Image (spheres, grey):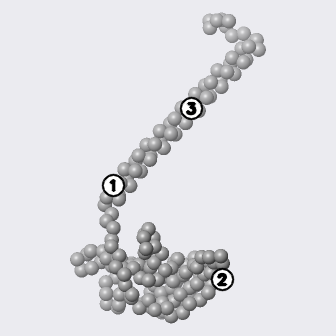
């Protein structure tokens, strides 16, 4: 059978048309796969360039260890749990701008999973991991002195220190 012969209705022509159809589908799939891979590579290159640019603009801040929080008339500050990959990981820290608008980071000795602080009182939710994991809520003051500790029945998700100084627990 030659290329110019008209198609016949023999069983051989069905096998050939099925083979052509399968070949077209395979080529279409290969084309779509190539486009997906090219898109993934292009995005990875774009993300790497964007990350390098962002990393160049963010300056690390050296941490200063403190034993108390700032008092009443001081500058406002932002309190958070440090996730730095160093010895401050998990510790409560805060950042404050000085009079020259330079950010300073301070690290406290408290180690918490969650923290909330308001009106001179705070709550620190702690997880002690081990063979038997235990959960605790610690209430502290501006001097970071522990006022009360409570054992919790389950994992803490958040805690709120109310403005009046009392504390509530949620889990």
Q: Is residue 162 visible?
A: no
Q: Nearer the viewer, residue 58 or 39?
A: 58
Residue 53: which disc? 1
Label whose residue precedes the other's in the sequence (2 or 1): 1
- Compared to 140, does 46 lie above or below? above
In percent of the image, x 25 and y 75: which residue is there?
Answer: 101
C-alpha distance separating marks 2 and 3: 55 Å
Which residue: 40% across, 50% down?
Answer: 48
Camera-side residue: 94 or 5? 94
Q: CA distance from mark 2 to mark 1?
A: 46 Å
Residue 42 higher or lower than 109, as above or below: above
Q: Residues within 10 Å of mark 1 (few under 14, many from 20)?
A: few
**Quarter of the picture holding the N terminus:** top right
Q: CA distance from mark 3 to mark 1?
A: 35 Å
Report whether 57 appears left or right of 152.
left
The kind of secondary structure element at disc 3 is helix
Q: Which secondary structure, mark 2? A: loop
Question: Which residue is drawn at the image coordinates 45% and 73% (left, top)?
Answer: 89
Residue that label 3 marks: 30
User: x, y (%) of residue 155?
Assistant: 62, 77
């Amino acid at each position: 059978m030659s290329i110019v012969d008209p198609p016949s209705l023999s069983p051989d022509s069905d096998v050939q048309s099925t083979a052509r159809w399968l070949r077209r589908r395979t080529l279409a799939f290969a084309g779509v796969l190539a486009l997906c891979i090219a898109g993934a590579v292009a995005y990875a290159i774009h993300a790497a360039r964007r990350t390098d640019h962002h990393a160049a603009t963010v300056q690390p801040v050296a941490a200063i260890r403190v034993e108390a929080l700032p008092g009443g008339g001081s500058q406002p500050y932002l309190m958070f749990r440090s996730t730095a990959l160093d010895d401050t990981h998990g510790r409560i820290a805060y950042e404050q701008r000085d009079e020259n608008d330079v950010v300073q980071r301070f690290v406290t000795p408290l180690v918490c999973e969650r923290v909330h602080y308001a009106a001179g009182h705070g709550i620190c939710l702690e997880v002690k991991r081990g063979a038997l994991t235990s959960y605790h809520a610690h209430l502290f003051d501006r001097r970071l002195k522990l006022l009360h500790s409570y054992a919790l029945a389950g994992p803490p998700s958040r805690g709120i220190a109310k403005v009046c100084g009392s504390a509530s627990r949620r889990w």
